[in-house]
Image (tube, rainbow, N blue to C red):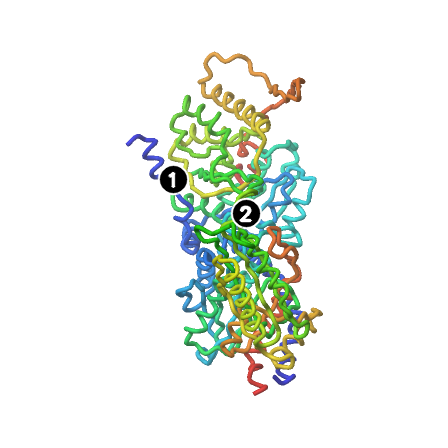
Amino acid sequence: MTKLESWIQHNTFHHSQFYDQLELLKQKEKTGLTISLCIPTLNEEATIGKEIVIFRSELMERYPLIDEIAVIDSGSTDKTLEVASSFGADTYFAGDILPSQGHKRGKGENLWKAIHQLKGDIICYVDADIKNIHPRFCYGLVAPLLYRPEMHYVKAFYDRPLAFSQGVRPSGGGRVTEILVRPLFSLFFPELTGLVQPLSGEYAVRREVLERLPFPIGYGVETSHIMDVYRQWGLEAFGQTDLDQRVHRNQETLSLGKMSFGILQSFLGRLKLMGMEGDLPEMTNTLRQFIAKDQQYEQICHEIVEEERPPMIDIPEYREKMGYDG
Amino acid sequence: MPDDALSPILETLPDTRKRLKEMREILLANAVMFGEIPAPTFAEAARARFLMDRFTEGGCLSASTDEVGNAVGIVPGTKSGSGCILLAAHLDTPFAKSVDHTVTVQKNGLAGAGILDNALGVAVIASLPIILEKLGIEFEHDLLLMGSTRSLGSGDIEGMRFFLNNNKLPIEAGVIVEGATLGRLSYASLGMSRGVVNCRIPHGYDFSRFGAAGAVAILNRVISGILNIRTPKEPVTQIILGSVEGGTSFNTIAKSGTLRYEIRSEQSGLVGDINRQIESLLGEIRSSSGVTLRLDEVARRHNGGLTYTDPLVSTCRAVMEVLNVDTIVAPTTGELAALIENNIPGVTLGMTYGENRHMQDELVAIDPIFTGLAQLLAVLQAIDKGICHDEA
């Protein structure tokens, strides 16, 4: 059995393995760890209410597995924060957290600021656009960390259908993974191909790992996390949990192009850091896309810069808050 | 029930409603989770299993399912064994498994296929053990909680019928919970019959004979005949033509077709009379056309129930009055009919206001649910204090 095969066999879980919430609660008490749930948002009023209701009821009231639920928002213009707050979530505008560090727009920014704002020893990130939300989206990711101390970073994967007008298609999704990320990993980091959905937005991570990771604030945050964790802690630090079906909003192909561009920037940047870049030319930040209408072809240029936040442990306010300098 | 026994229950209602609001997430989460489990009639197993889990987590005794898939659990009373109060909600919905069952949660409402009928009702049953515990409410009687199967359409409330026909526990009274509408007070059953007329053109049918036609045309004759049946306006009697299906294309004579109808009447015996008239009509068309026409009765209810002045009904009205809820008296063809057939006193109550019933965007208003819940708890407490015995 290869190392990768062995890893897949031992570090891949199914959420049903952790269905016994009472047992999970006992294990949590045994470890003494605290858990925070973070939901990054930007205009998610349609789905945020349900997520808060389900998580609060099932994982705080019924089985107190999580110690806090926080919504970290990038600046929604709809009622995301109002709805989340009305159902009892702690809500924050990312710009109000660590104001000395400024405010950048992007999901990665919210995830990074959550490390400073939230209290838990484990932070579980769950996207806000999941239509079929279920407690498994949290406990399925947290549970491996409670049972396996050597594990640091647990990713979700799913049979991810794309919601469309005629109901639910039984398979599909993960297009950027299959077209971009998996080929890149296959070429440069074959062991990482064992991660079924490296770009999934749901993962649970130990604080001591999160605070040591730099955070791209844009599309590349998941890819660079995986590469950084792999570089520092090795393959054994990863776990992954099958959460079955995930129904979410579909994205247009052009948007996926922008996402791919950001991911590629992060990936190549990491290669450079790791001394694996070879003979690459100077990289541009401009993505060119075309829109065709009749015989007219319009070129659209996007400036996509994968700005990056340093590891949280390097931020003075955070060090002070956590008592690292005392 | 004497007023002095009801008064303390009524006095606590506003406070109960307020405290119930503090348990909002528990109830809403259950409504969402039940709503997202498809449960078309005859395929309610997944919903029943989840309800069983909730009963077990809530500390219910004897949580179990029976031969027809009903999920049952008991909240033991302080005088356990002295009798039980049945609290039930039907598990099934009219929506196929393939329909998108996603529920959305808005600030003031829940929306989705089946959330109104009857995911909310089931959620109330599922949440009750934990609600009673948090409110510190205890009953003397055992509270028998039930999610019943095979309620709708041709299900013919078979789940509830099976349970009542085979149950050994003494049931004092029953309350049926429906998502909508708050203020609904059903205490009597309508006479009702659901029929399916199947029309089939036999092999070798002679289309050259006088008056020969396809199945659709034959069903048209059946429909015309049914519309000619005289029904009284008082007591209210109705024949509802629910659906017609048949044929395959523009230019092929239909070889088969189906008509579904429902007869309902406040007058005892009239449903049977109308059904006999339809049988005669089919016989006449059958003999003159040479086609196969078959009538299957798939559901039947009998007239009966409590009276407007029955203490249980009066108590429900008093509770609604204190809560400023307008009473809507309406007869039922739901689970309550099975209780009535078994001479068990009971009522059906609605939990909140809703819209778009039986459409995929059914809508449930959140805030009134707590009034509906307070109402339910008060009625259960009144039954527990002996309301159903006073008239005798």
Q: Is residue B281 left or right of residue A2?
A: right
Q: Nearer the viewer, residue A325 or B164?
A: B164
User: Which dot marks residue B349?
Assistant: none
Q: How many marks?
A: 2
Label 2: chain letter: B
In the image, residue B345 above or below residue B356: below
In the image, residue A262 above or below residue A173: above
Disc 2 designates what residue?
Answer: B100
Label 1: chain letter: A
Residue at x 51%, y 79% (from the top left corner): B343
- Residue A124, visible in the rendered structure: yes
Q: Are marks 1 and 2 in contact (CB under 8 Å)?
A: no
In the image, farthest residue toward the left: A1
> Where residue B97 appears, x then y in whole percent?
49, 50
> Where residue A75 appears, x then y in whole percent?
67, 38
Mark 2 neighbour density, 10 Å: few (under 14) some (14–19) many (20 or more): some
- Residue B11, visible in the rendered structure: no
> Where residue B123 appears, x then y in whole percent?
54, 60
Secondary structure beneath dot 1 equals: strand
Q: The N terminus of chain A lies in which quarter of the figure?
A: top left
User: Which dot marks residue A12?
Assistant: 1
In the image, residue B13 above or below residue A79: below
**Disc 1 from disc 2: Cα separation:** 30 Å
Q: Nearer the viewer, residue B241 or B219?
A: B219
Q: Nearer the viewer, residue B105 or A128?
A: B105
In the image, farthest residue toward the bottom: B392
Asked if labels 1 and 2 share a chain, the reply is: no
Q: On the image, which quarter does residue A249 sit in?
A: top right
Secondary structure beneath dot 2 equals: loop
Q: Amino acid at mark 1?
A: Thr
> Where residue A112 appears, x then y in whole percent?
56, 35
